[in-house]
Amino acid sequence: MQNVQNMMSIKFESRSVNEGFARQTVAAFVAQLDPTIDELNDIKTAVSEAVTNSIVHAYADKLGYITVSVKLFEGGRVEIKVKDTGCGIPDVAKAREPMFTTGDDTRSGMGFTIMESFMDKLRVRSSAGRGTVVTMAKSLALRAGGR
């Protein structure tokens, strides 16, 4: 197992305006690994999707808290956890199917699919009535100057 170089965690209310805050905060933290613009955009997109899922689905008609944690490992691996204590996902396998949504007709149902396509690993743990933890990992390409 690689050693953790640095880590951070933020907790905020499940307001839609905070999605951009989470995305930018994670990007600023990950920037210390000198990712490419594409790598940074992939991470920002995945964080946006995970946080939006918590806002829209976990806390549909109420406010709650979302915690985003980031660990940076030697060799350029990034691990991001997005955790809520909302309603939970009754069937994670079904929720991960493309086009499946429990939201209204403005939702695409592509959140988990997008996260999976932009990150190297995606794990979803959920318990009805207790919340969801989405764990995403990405290994950044080593550049000529090293990390």
Image (cartoon, rainbow, N blue to C red):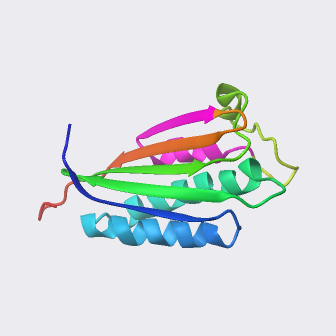
The answer to which of 79 and 86 lies nearer the viewer is 86
The answer to if 66 sits in the magenta stretch is no
State whether residue 25 is above or below residue 130: below
Q: Picture coordinates of residue 100 (x, y %)? A: 76, 36
Q: How many marks?
A: 0
- The residue sitting at 70% across, 47% down in the picture is 86
Q: Picture coordinates of residue 130 (x, y %)? A: 66, 39
State whether residue 47 is above or below residue 91: below
- The residue sitting at 50% across, 35% down in the picture is 123
Quadrant where the image shows the N terminus: top left
- The residue sitting at 19% across, 42% down in the picture is 2
Q: Picture coordinates of residue 30 (x, y %)? A: 35, 64
| 129 sits to left or right of 83 | right
**Picture quadrant where residue 96 is located:** top right
| 13 sits to left or right of 10 | right
Q: Which residues are magenta?
A: 109-126
